Structures are given as C-alpha cells and as structure tokens.
Amino acid sequence: MRFDIISVLPDLLTSPFAHSILQRAQKKGVAEIVVHNLRDYATNKQKSVDDYPYGGGSGMIMSVEPFALCIEKLQNERTYDEIIFMTPDGETLNQGIANQLSIQKNIIILCGHYKGIDQRIRDIYVTREISIGDYVLSGGELPAAVVVDTVVRLVPGVLNDETSALSDSFQGDLLDAPLYTRPAEWRGHKVPDVLLSGHEAKINEWRHDEAVKRTQERRPDLLK
Ligand code: ADE
C-alpha cells in the first residue's frame, strides 16, 4: 500500500517512518510512504501557502491552489482510494478505521497548519476527515504519522508473527492481559505461577480472564 502525505513541514515526517516496523515494511516493499513538500506547489514568488481569512479574524488559512496542484499531480499518476484530512473536527481514529484503511491501496493524507485550510479543499478533494483525539496539536503531521503507523502494521507481511496484530488490545474488543518476561522473580515480585506452568489451556484461560478483568476495570465501554 502507498501513502502520500502532503505537508509544509516534511522534515517532521522523516524520522517516524525510518525505524522499526515502518522501516521494515518499506524495505520489504509492502508499504511505500512518500512525503511531499506543499511549498513546492506554491504558485507565487514568495512561495506562500497561506493567506488571510475572508471575513476577518485571527490566524492564516492554507490556500486551495497548492493543495489542489499537488493532489491533482498525484491523481494523474495513480488512483486514490481515500484523501484524508487530519483535523480535530474529524471522526475519532479507532481500530475499526485502521482496519478499513489497511485494505486500501493508495491513500493521500493532507496535514493542516495555522488556523486551518480553505473549506473548498475539504469539499472538493477530501473523502474522509480523521482526528486522533479530543485535543489540538499544532499541525497534522504527528496525527498523520499516527494513522500511518496504526494502518501499516496491519498490512499482511509487515509483522513477523502474522497473528500478533490480531491479538492486540482493541482488535478483539478486549485489552491485553498483563505480560511478563524473564526473570521469573525480580526484587521479590514474581511472575504468576500459571505462566510458568507450561499448561497451555490454563495459560489461555488465565489470559482471557485477566483481559476481561482489565477491560471491565479500565474500559467497560468496550464490553457493551
Ligand atoms: N490537527 C490538530 N489537532 C489534531 C487532532 N487532534 N487530530 C488530527 N489532526 C489534528
């Protein structure tokens, strides 16, 4: 799958995709993540990509033309399944949305800045608006990185252990059970005996019970 991310701060998006699972996905050719500098599509001498708001008010608004030129250039090269705008006004990202996006082939993500973007970009090009939560960040780059990370790790072939994305918290409506690794005892704190028992059925039962308990305590809304 391919992501094209359009941003005025492309440098912000180099590091998140250059490590670990996202780096491996790109090396394997399972995911391609391309960042475009919106300023390359500015049409005026000053290379500005924003302007004052009609009707007055504070803050600058990102102009329609640079986004339009970049989107249309990409659309001439391939067909896109979604054009996503990252905004706190959007639907809140969850595992279900990540699952839907993970079966798409080509996705554009627009990162906003300043006070926002010209509504005509949203009306004409954007197919989906996504928020990563009820708080405001200074731009759409970090939210875009969150979307790409949560989606790419679901693409078959990205994780080594094919089943491990399926057993994540949220994938099955339950949070994860507590996890332990060596040593079996650390400063007097012991790993639960059942995990050392080698008894697979009992371990699975314990994990399921703990997952239900944790979900009831922390996220009872997930059990409804
Ligand atoms: N841009 C600024 N805040 C955001 C948020 N919470 N989600 C998505 N994009 C944003």
Image (cartoon, rainbow, N blue to C red):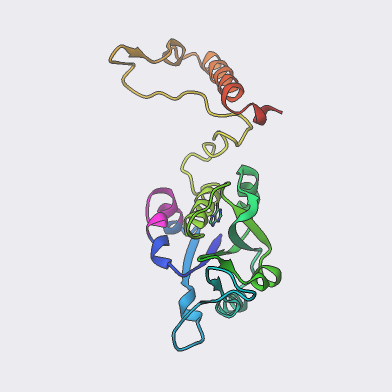
Q: Is residue 21 magenta?
A: yes
Residue 188 is situated, as x and y percent measured from the top left of the image, at 30, 11
Majority secondary structure in the magenta region: helix
Q: Residue at x 60, y 64 (%)?
A: 106
Residue most extreme to the bottom: 45
**Horizontal and vertical percent position of residue 9:** 43, 67
Q: Nearer the viewer, residue 36 or 55?
A: 55
Task: Tell which of 132 and 13 is nearer to you.
Answer: 132
Name the residue located 42 percent from the left edge and 56 percent from the top edge. Answer: 17
Q: Is residue 62 left or right of residue 104?
A: left
Residue 53 sits above or below residue 169 on the image = below
Rendering coords of residue 165 (x, y %): 54, 39
From the viewer's side, name the closer residue of 28 and 38: 38
The quadrant of the picture occupied by the N terminus is bottom right
Q: Residue farthest to the left?
A: 187
Please provide the residue range marked out in magenta.
15-25
How many numbered marks does the figure carry?
0
Q: In percent of the image, x 39 and y 49: which residue is there?
A: 20
Along the line of sight, the residue nearer the viewer: 163 or 87: 87
Q: Is residue 128 left or right of residue 65?
A: right
| Residue 35 magenta | no
- Residue 189 figure quarter: top left
Looking at the picture, how far across and down is residue 10, in whole percent? 42, 67
Quadrant, the C terminus: top right
- The residue sitting at 50% across, 80% down in the picture is 41
Q: Quadrant of ligand 1?
A: bottom right
